[in-house]
Image: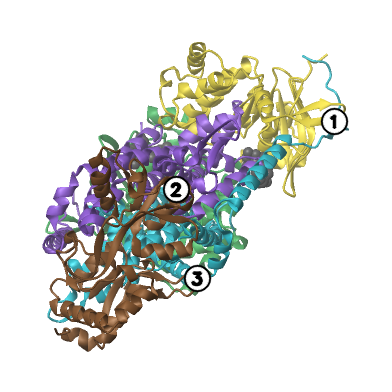
Chain colours: A brown, B yellow, C purple, D cyan, E green
């Protein structure tokens, strides 16, 4: 596949990122520099293509319009590849994420397994698809077996979910499992995982639907990184080894 | 023997910052007396009245109204400032009529008059309302009870203000240039009300530039200049044969 | 000097044409039409706006927005009046407390105030008198309570400045006349000064009211489901950001359009006795 | 009548005690101390506040906040004055345009306005005169430009109401005196009425200014990195939400504390010639 | 032959809503003449002056000032309303002094006076400033140039207002009760300035309650009642032997 001539001429790919999702992307509190797995992966992809990444911070509200208006070429920001997001965008899936329950370390014994959460309050960021995932789990594992349903609380981001967990406002929370090692290293002895992830979802690098040339070139580059071992090295560096993918797919998220 | 004074001002001094407005002013007013105070602009007439009504605090000297010391209680040879509520109660002994009327613009004439008796004196509303209507009739405004101040002429407003002060049943009425903000043809109607009030035996202290009124009604005329009482005596004497040069100069300027 | 003046008593006055105005109207209408067309054909999908305008979650959010606006303004006005009166008190302690309150709450972001109230349990895990009767803070500090406290107390700081300006605008003669009929300071404020100050207070308070309609949206950070929160929940799922913000805007405009005549009514009510009113 | 009055000229005045005040001060200080202690021992880790208070990203955000506040208020004041004058024009077209502007921009959420400016390319992909000179909209509408337009134009709608109230507060005699010396309406507004209106305009404008300091934080949705945005970026990484909001609050308080004396200075300046000023 | 009138009012009518304030008022004023207008409150005196100065638009009739028709141009037997700028220019022919002074409070006395000449007439600032100082000296305020209005007494403010109007070099001066907002002792100083102005040959239309001034200075006195000119003639005649019953009633009310 061919990189569009315009991008080739520029020498850079502009990429939107919301640096609020460690360890995939965040601003290092000490230096203010963008860092994280996505940043490293993006830079490696660009290098493979003989280009540079030009990172642009954005917000959820401005992210997809930026792709439509051509303000950015791609989005690489830990975004879930969901069918509802695909009418202007096309996703190259590059990571898998397990939807993982966790609770306060001091209450770990109350919740030996996921089913123990039935009838409790469980929070997750309302900006993500996780509130829906919790509800699906509750419907099958709790309501389906005659237990009381989980009360789902949509919080203002995952940091807020954890603050509410510390106050006892909610009993457990859910985040993508790729983020939890980092969080648990930040706040040691605070949290404990509850059971296995309920489901695996795919994260995608979004491109404009029309820009198939760029998409295919990036997908090829990703395949190259997987083949030459760079991808595995990056995963290990950010403790994401169990989130890696074997095959690069396009728009395969459910 | 003359009756005891109902207002007794003793050695009053008042400063605004470093500027002394009143210099050792003393004045007695007996029940039923009408005292007119005249003097050039800035001579301290308004300030004197405001001290009597406790709208400003004097810096030295004492004011007695109806046997009570204004603003202080006496304990063991020392003076203790009274709390606000007690001063508000003392003020009920004096009724004040201002130069610029100061009616409450959001209330009708009747509401203006009954506000004090009902809200402050807690008198019965129905009775007060009847009294207020009688007072309005007395000042010639029986048909204006429901009018707002903005719908009344200056002279009418000032008559409502007089009725408002009277309805509190004060022992002494204080007037601060009650006609000087009025058009010339409206002055007469206000002065007529005041004459009638004087004839009814009300004790009155009147700051005024209306020398005709003073001549006709005042038992005594006081001339002030630069914060001092310069001359005091009967109306004929002070206005007709002033003894002091400053009084003469003032009178010739006002009479033109 | 000129000669004798012409007699023009029979002349009629030519009607004024105002060509300039008509041209301006035409230009403005053209611009509006062009803008409307651009919006219509632009990348905004209007069927989404139509679909979600009356979605149940949006309507619930709308109701919450309206209720919280009035409740928080109520708290704000009560606090604002008390604070304004304290600021004008002769007592320096009361004045100091009032100034400190205004400084602190005007000076900190509302979002922080909301989060502090909502997360009060981080500081006071239980409320009440210890050993006698206590309650878990998180049970008291629901999103509604925290939003009401956060928005209302913040608004009180702003309102107090508005009320203070109103009190200062009333002629000092009115205070004196009230004193002269034996009123204490508080009675004079309540009966004489505040009713007159309302005339000056209402227009800026109208601004604040309209501001509050939109300020409630900040309470979405503490899960208070006002209209913007509802719209966001939808666009987080389907990514129709602009369309759902337009839905919210339409409802905001509707509320504001209803509040404006209400303000006029109040203004008329408090203009009683002045040249304009009856 | 009572007997002769006592001679009290030798009596001294007892100093006032104000017991109530001292008790109130004590109670307030105790409350503040209790609150301070609760904050100190509560789940807030103050060393984070200290560390990040002067972090470079925070300081950059602070600078951006200050610059944007002044720039957007500048735009808002210019638009507000123009709109207020239009609202009082005898020309009904100008009046209508002004009223429509105030209605629309006070009535829609700022966040929508910001996003519409930022995403103007959805509607107008290119700006300029077509076939002659055009430019890609996204290149013009940088976060700074969009924030300035969004915040400034929104502020203009609010400011115009403040200015209008100020213009109405100037005695009509002043308009007439200005006309009588041959001034046209606009000259009279500029030289005579506006300078006097400033006295009434400045206090509520101070409120709006302080509001703008915090309103700039909304511009973080279009990537404008003001101070709250910087603080958020840090707490996304380290989860210290309350601590970083306190950092932001300290800086906001600092700005507001500096703006207040500035406002007083301006008030003094425009009180020239009135009883209070020189 | 008498000189042509410099102000000529022909059949003036004015309504406020349904209420007719002026009924077919006609009046000629010749150069150098001083005309005093007297009448009860509400009789339309202020409205008449304001029509001459185009602060209100009449509903019928015409006003000519110095040979120019106020507010309209004539084309083909029809009247066309002038634009605002042209009306502002026409106003320069008349200088107005208001009852409540209306000085600009944010400007010093000197700045008040030079504002019009510099900003409106675009005259050279230095020259105007010298002229303004001369005028201040003429009204007895040479030392008050740098004072703000709030720092001046009422009489001083009114004299500054007169200087402000004069500095525009108007053909006619209009005065609307220039002394009625003043304390009695301050009235004299303003009337003295006006007398001096009349003696210097300025054409003046003066609404006033000061009958002494009218008697002394006015070439003609006009009595208005309920929007009509009731009586017009020399000061001695109108004030001394009024022909009309209404004039007599008014004079006896004012003289008390
Ligand atoms: N609140 C105040 N602060 C400072 N100075 C004041 C105040 N009130 C009055 N003065 C000054 O005190 C002096 C006396 O004022 P006062 O009003 O008592 O005079 P007056 O005789 O009533 O004059 P007028 O005839 O003008 O009413 C004046 O020089 C005045 O400027
Ligand atoms: N703008 C206005 N709108 C409505 N009515 C008005 C207006 N101006 C004046 N009037 C009315 O017109 C009448 C004449 O007013 P005008 O001010 O001309 O009287 P005047 O003779 O100057 O009285 P005064 O001696 O009180 O100044 C009055 O009844 C007044 O209420
Ligand atoms: Mg006085
Ligand atoms: Mg008049």
Residue E9: % across, % down: 29, 48
Q: Taking the image as drawn, is residue D52 in sight? A: yes
Q: Which residue does the numbered mark 3 point to in the structure image? A: D59
Residue marked by disc 1: B78
Q: Chain of mark 3?
A: D
Image position of C4 with respect to C64: above or below: below
Q: Secondary structure at mark 1?
A: strand
Report if the CB atoms under discs 3 and 2 are less than 8 Å apart.
no
Looking at the image, residue C173 sits to the left or right of residue C7; the answer is: right
Q: Nearer the viewer, residue D223 or A48?
A: A48
Category of crowding for the residue at label 2, using alpha-carbon neighbours closer than 10 angstroms: few (below 14), some (14–19), many (at least 20)? few
| Element at label 3 | helix
**How far across and how far down the image is residue E215, in percent?**
49, 42
Mark toward the viewer: 3 or 2: 2
Up the image or down, D259 lies above or below E34; here it is below
Tell me the CA gap for discs 3 and 2: 44 Å
- CA gap, disc 2 to disc 1? 76 Å
- Judge the density around disc 3: few (<14), some (14-19), many (≥20) Cα neighbours within 10 Å: some
Total marks shown come to 3
Q: CA distance from mark 1 to mark 3?
A: 61 Å
**Quadrant location of the C terminus of chain C?**
top left
Give the position of the N terminus of chain C as an image quadrant: bottom left
Q: Is residue B90 left or right of residue A104?
A: right
Disc 1 residue: CB within 8 Å of ligand 1: no
| The residue at label 2 has a CB less than 8 Å from ligand 1 | no
Q: Position of residue E182 (x, y in %)?
A: 55, 43
Mark 2, residue position: A109
| Chain letter for mark 1 | B
State left or right for residue B104 relative to residue D185: right
């Amino acid at each position: 596949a061919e990189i569009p001539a315009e991008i080739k001429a520029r020498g850079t790919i502009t990429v939107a990122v919301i640096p609020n999702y460690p360890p995939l992307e965040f601003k290092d509190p000490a230096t203010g520099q963008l860092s994280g797995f996505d940043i490293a992966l993006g830079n490696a992809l660009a290098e493979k293509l003989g280009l540079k990444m030009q990172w642009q911070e954005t917000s959820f509200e401005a992210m997809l319009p930026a792709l439509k208006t051509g303000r950015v070429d791609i989005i690489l920001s830990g975004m879930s590849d969901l069918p509802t997001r695909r009418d202007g965008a096309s996703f190259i899936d590059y990571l898998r994420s397990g939807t993982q329950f966790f609770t306060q370390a001091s209450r770990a014994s109350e919740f030996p397994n996921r089913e123990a959460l039935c009838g409790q309050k469980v929070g997750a960021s309302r900006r993500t698809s996780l509130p829906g995932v919790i509800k699906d789990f509750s419907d099958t594992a709790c309501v389906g077996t005659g237990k009381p349903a989980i009360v789902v609380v949509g919080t203002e981001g995952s940091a807020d979910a954890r603050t509410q967990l510390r106050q006892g406002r909610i009993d457990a929370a859910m985040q993508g499992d790729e983020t939890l090692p980092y969080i648990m290293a930040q706040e040691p002895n605070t949290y404990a995982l509850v059971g296995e992830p309920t489901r695996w979802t795919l994260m995608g690098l979004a491109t404009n639907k029309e820009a198939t040339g760029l998409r295919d070139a990036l997908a090829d580059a990703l395949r190259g990184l997987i083949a030459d071992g760079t991808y595995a090295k990056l995963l290990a560096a950010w403790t994401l080894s169990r989130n890696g993918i074997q095959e690069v797919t396009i728009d395969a998220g459910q | 023997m003359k009756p005891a004074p109902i207002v007794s001002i003793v050695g009053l001094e008042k400063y605004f910052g470093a500027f002394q407005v009143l210099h050792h002013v003393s004045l007695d007013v007996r029940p039923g007396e009408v005292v007119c105070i005249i003097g050039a602009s800035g001579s301290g007439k308004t300030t004197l009245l405001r001290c009597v009504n406790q709208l400003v605090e004097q810096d030295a000297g004492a004011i007695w109204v109806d046997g009570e010391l204004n603003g202080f209680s006496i304990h063991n040879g020392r003076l203790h400032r009274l709390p606000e509520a007690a001063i508000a109660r003392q003020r009920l002994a004096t009724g004040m009529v201002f130069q610029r009327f100061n009616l409450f613009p959001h209330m009708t004439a009747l509401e203006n008059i009954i506000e004090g008796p009902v809200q402050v004196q807690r008198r019965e509303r129905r009775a007060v309302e009847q009294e207020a209507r009688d007072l309005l009739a007395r000042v010639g405004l029986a048909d204006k009870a429901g009018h707002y101040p903005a719908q009344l002429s200056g002279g009418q407003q000032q008559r409502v203000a007089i009725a408002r002060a009277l309805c509190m049943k004060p022992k002494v009425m204080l007037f601060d240039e009650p006609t000087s903000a009025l058009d010339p043809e409206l002055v007469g109607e206000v002065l007529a009300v005041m004459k009638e009030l004087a004839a009814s035996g009300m004790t009155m202290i009147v700051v005024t530039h209306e020398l005709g009124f003073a001549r006709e009604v005042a038992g005594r005329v006081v001339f002030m200049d630069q914060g001092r009482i310069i001359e005091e005596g009967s109306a004929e004497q002070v206005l007709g044969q002033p003894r002091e040069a400053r009084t003469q100069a003032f009178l010739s300027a006002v009479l033109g | 000097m000129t000669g004798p003046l012409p007699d023009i008593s029979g002349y009629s006055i030519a009607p004024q044409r105002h060509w300039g105005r008509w041209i301006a109207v035409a230009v403005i209408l053209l611009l509006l039409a062009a803008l409307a067309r651009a919006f219509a054909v632009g990348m905004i999908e209007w069927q989404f706006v139509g679909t979600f305008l009356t979605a149940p979650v949006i309507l619930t959010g709308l109701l919450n927005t309206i209720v919280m606006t009035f409740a928080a303004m109520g708290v704000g006005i009560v606090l604002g009046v008390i604070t304004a009166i304290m600021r004008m008190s002769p007592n320096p302690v009361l004045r100091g407390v009032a100034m400190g309150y205004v400084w602190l709450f005007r000076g900190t972001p509302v979002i922080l105030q909301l989060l502090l109230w909502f997360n009060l349990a981080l500081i006071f895990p239980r409320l009440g008198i210890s050993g006698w009767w206590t309650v878990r803070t998180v049970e008291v500090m629901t999103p509604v309570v925290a939003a009401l406290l956060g928005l209302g107390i913040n608004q009180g700081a702003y309102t107090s400045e508005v009320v203070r300006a109103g009190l200062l605008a009333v002629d000092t003669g009115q205070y004196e006349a009230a004193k002269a009929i034996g009123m204490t300071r508080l009675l004079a404020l309540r009966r004489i000064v505040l009713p007159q100050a309302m005339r000056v207070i209402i227009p800026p308070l109208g601004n604040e009211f309209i501001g509050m309609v939109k300020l409630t949206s900040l309470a979405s950070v503490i899960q208070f489901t006002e209209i913007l929160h509802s719209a966001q929940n939808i666009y987080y799922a389907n990514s129709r950001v602009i369309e759902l913000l337009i839905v919210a805007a339409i409802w905001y405009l509707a509320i504001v359009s209803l509040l404006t005549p209400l303000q006029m009514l109040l203004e008329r009510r408090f203009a009683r006795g002045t040249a304009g009113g009856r």
